[in-house]
Image (cartoon, helix red, strand yellow):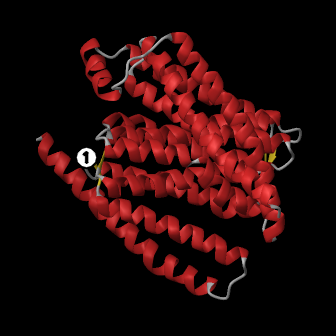
């Protein structure tokens, strides 16, 4: 492994983060200038823009014949987004959850996660599967924009006041930001994927493992920056909306386009189908009771998310290295940590449901 490979890998991540920042800034201003609701901008333009690295990397990997990276990147990023990003953001400040997310966007995220599992059962995301997924993101975006048009002007103005402290600027300047951001994403994705393949070969692990961990965390850096910064600045509902929108985009658009452009589709490794994809679904489902139990995500719930992400990565590393500690670690998680967490969430959800029923009377 040469120093040049490591340097290009790091520069690739830097270009992905900077490119996503330019893309989000320019696209958000263009959307707001066009009269699109700031909430929808957060759920679509900002969320999609911060997922642009996943799109660039997965499509590049699919073209380059490293399709395991394409699938592992999406699944790993979705797990990382919920457990690590929401966990870290909630530790910074308890997060607020908009009711629209609970009623509509989180169920959509859960639904498309199950859809991915069904499409992957044959071991491949083919071109027909990719077309179906990509059609889903088109429908989701159009639906969000149409819904935003129904909002009252007063609500839109109030949201706009809290969503952006910057002047929109000239349209051509924002368009240049978008073009420059896309260019950086393409170049950064090439360097990151090439470096990830070299790392996988040098470490003797599969490209899927590299995609689930290093690549997934690297391409999720824009989501980390966006959500944590939104939490610090007090826009705590944007932090949650960014993650939910990004996860939906990753499955529908990133894997959809990857399935369309890959010569033989995107193969799904048996291990990813049996373990990582169900983990992604379980993480999405966990959002429902946690979001439902209160006005937001408390700090202890954020700590719980971070604990489970650390446990997930630990399991992957132990399994990849064939460690003798793996059986003990697995038993501790299956027979203690997971049941305890499940009981806690069920009790909290029941209490929240009871409070709502009492308040409704």
Quadrant of image for the C terminus: top left
Q: Residue at x 40, y 67 (%)?
A: 342
Q: Position of residue 125 (x, y in %)?
A: 77, 43
| Front-most of residues 103 and 329 | 329
Q: Position of residue 220 (x, y in %)?
A: 57, 48
Q: Could you tell whether 351 is left or right of 165 in the image?
A: left
Q: Position of residue 260 (x, y in %)?
A: 79, 33
On the image, numbered disc 1 is attached to which residue?
Answer: 295
Q: Residue at x 42, y 38 (%)?
A: 241
- Work out whether residue 339 can be spotted: yes
Q: Could you tell whether 315 is left or right of 271 in the image?
A: left
| Front-most of residues 35 and 286 | 35
Above or below for 303 versus 186: below
Q: Position of residue 95 (x, y in %)?
A: 31, 48
| Front-most of residues 361 and 250 | 250
Q: Could you tell whether 293 is left or right of 139 in the image?
A: left
Q: Could you tell whether 129 is left or right of 278 in the image?
A: right
| Front-most of residues 153 and 190 | 190
Above or below for 174 versus 61: above
């Amino acid at each position: 492994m040469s120093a040049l490979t490591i340097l290009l890998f790091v520069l690739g991540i830097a270009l992905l983060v900077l490119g996503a920042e330019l893309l989000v800034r320019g696209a958000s201003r263009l959307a707001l200038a066009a009269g699109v609701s700031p909430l929808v901008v957060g759920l679509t333009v900002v969320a999609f823009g911060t997922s642009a690295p996943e799109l660039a990397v997965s499509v590049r990997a699919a073209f380059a014949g490293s399709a395991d990276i394409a699938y592992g990147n999406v699944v790993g990023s979705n797990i990382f987004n919920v457990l690590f990003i929401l966990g870290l953001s909630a530790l910074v400040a308890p997060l607020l959850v908009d009711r629209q997310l609970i009623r509509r966007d989180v169920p959509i995220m859960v639904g498309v996660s199950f859809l991915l599992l069904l499409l992957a059962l044959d071991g491949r995301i083919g071109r027909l599967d990719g077309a179906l997924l990509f059609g889903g993101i088109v429908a989701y975006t159009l639906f969000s924009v149409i819904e935003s048009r129904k909002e009252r002007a007063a609500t839109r103005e109030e949201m706009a006041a809290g969503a952006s402290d910057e002047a929109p600027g000239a349209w051509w300047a924002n368009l240049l930001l978008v073009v420059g951001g896309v260019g950086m994403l393409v170049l950064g994705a090439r360097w990151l994927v090439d470096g990830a393949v070299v790392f996988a070969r040098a470490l003797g692990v599969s490209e899927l493992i590299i995609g689930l961990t290093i690549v997934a965390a690297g391409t999720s850096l824009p989501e980390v920056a966006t959500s944590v910064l939104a939490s610090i600045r007090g826009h705590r509902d944007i932090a949650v909306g960014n993650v939910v929108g990004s996860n939906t985009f990753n499955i529908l658009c990133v894997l959809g386009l990857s399935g369309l452009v890959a010569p033989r589709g995107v193969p799904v490794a048996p291990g990813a189908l049996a373990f990582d994809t169900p983990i992604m679904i379980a993480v999405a489902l966990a959002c429902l009771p946690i979001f439902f139990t209160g006005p937001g995500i408390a700090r202890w719930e954020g700590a719980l998310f971070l604990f489970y992400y650390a446990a997930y990565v630990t399991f992957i590393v132990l399994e990849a290295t064939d460690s003798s500690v793996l059986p003990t670690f697995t038993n501790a998680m299956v027979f203690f940590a997971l049941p305890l967490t499940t009981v806690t969430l069920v009790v909290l959800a029941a209490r929240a449901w009871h409070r709502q029923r009492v308040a409704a009377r």
